Image (tube, rainbow, N blue to C red):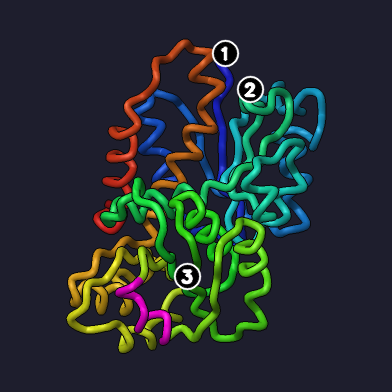
Amino acid sequence: MRPVLRAAVLGRPIAHSLSPVLHAAAYRVLGLDVDYGRRDLGEDEVLAFAAEHLGAPGAAEPVLAAARGQDWLGCSVTMPLKRAAVAAAGHVSDRVRLLGTANTLVRDHPSAPGVVHAENTDVDGILGALAAAGLDRAARGGTVGVLGNGGTATAAVLAATTLGADAVLFGVRDAARAAEVTALADALGLRWETIGQPDLLRRAPGLRAVVATLPPRAADVLAAHVPADAALPPLLDAAYDPWPSVLASAWSREVGPVASGLSMLLHQGIEQVRLFTARPRAAAGMPEPDWAAVTRAAADALGPAAG
């Protein structure tokens, strides 16, 4: 009997995660039978779960539940588990090493045969969402604005480097709490400045892009500071429930291009699908998929805000 291919998203709370919707649509287009579910786990449960289903960190061979006909591809990881997930891997990408967080655990990926590989595709999500909103990824220079100073903000800093930006402007409520993102900017050779969140929005017309990483509704009060009658850069508002957010609506009224957090979810999820399926696609001798078609199908499943 052919083993059932399995994957899951790990987090807490996890019941409302849209990752299963995205992944199911992608696997249908790829013609792969993958059972992708949700697992409600706390930070102290990640290592044991990963060891049982993906393999212990650094093990010569993944410890799989083969007797039960299971073949785990990997796990998507959401909050609050992204830091704990790093310890579950025997091999980590350069991104994970820089950020200290992982949103993807891959069993036996070609880049790390025989061990669990940790990756952070949040960077891909940010880049893909901004490109969908019209950002020219081939351009170089300029300053990227980042609202917030949490985990998604660190991914936005790394995305800024990938875009060839020269500097990052951080809009924060408390500059003393921005040490992690500013240290990362230093490590990447980016100039940076911390200012108040309303001030960042007032300076938006001079920025290459703005990434809002605040929790849902936290940016509502900032909408009043969106400049009127000014050319606005692409905005990615990582919050997507409710959508459109108050900030996104204000941006759109000024004819500024907007991407939702669902677009970020879409593009980071498609990169996870690439990673999860690399081994079974190679084993089956499958040609390189039409990733644009896979992305369109997943976007349709998520709804209009993901497009």
Separation of disc 1 and disc 3 at Cα? 50 Å
Residue type at numbered disc 3:
Val
- For badge 2, the amino acid type reads Gly
Q: Is residue 303 above or below residue 114?
A: below
The reply, left or right, for residue 13 in relation to residue 242 is right
**Do labels 1 and 3 touch, CB within 8 Å?**
no
Q: Residue beneath label 1, please?
A: 1
Residue 69 visible? The answer is yes
Look at 35% across and 83% down and name the residue there: 202
Residue at 54% in and 65% down: 153
Residue 47: x %, y % from top left: 77, 47
Q: Up-down: is 176 above or below 30?
A: below
Which mark is first along the chain, 3 or 2?
A: 2
**CB of mark 1 within 8 Å of CB of mark 2?**
yes
* Kind of element beneath mark 2: loop
Which amino acid does the dot numbered 1 rest on?
Met
N-terminal-most mark, 1 or 3: 1
**Which quarter of the figure is the N terminus placed in?**
top right
Contact (CB < 8 A) between labels 2 and 3?
no
Residue, x 39% and y 52% (percent of image)?
Answer: 140
* Residue matched to label 3: 146
Give the quadrant of residue 83.
Answer: bottom right
**C-alpha span from label 2 to label 3:** 46 Å
- Is residue 163 or residue 134 the one in the foreground? 163
Residue with the mark numbered 2: 69
Q: Nearer the viewer, mark 2 or mark 3?
A: 3
Q: Is residue 279 left or right of residue 54?
A: left
At horizontal 25% and vertical 64% (from top left) the residue drawn is 257
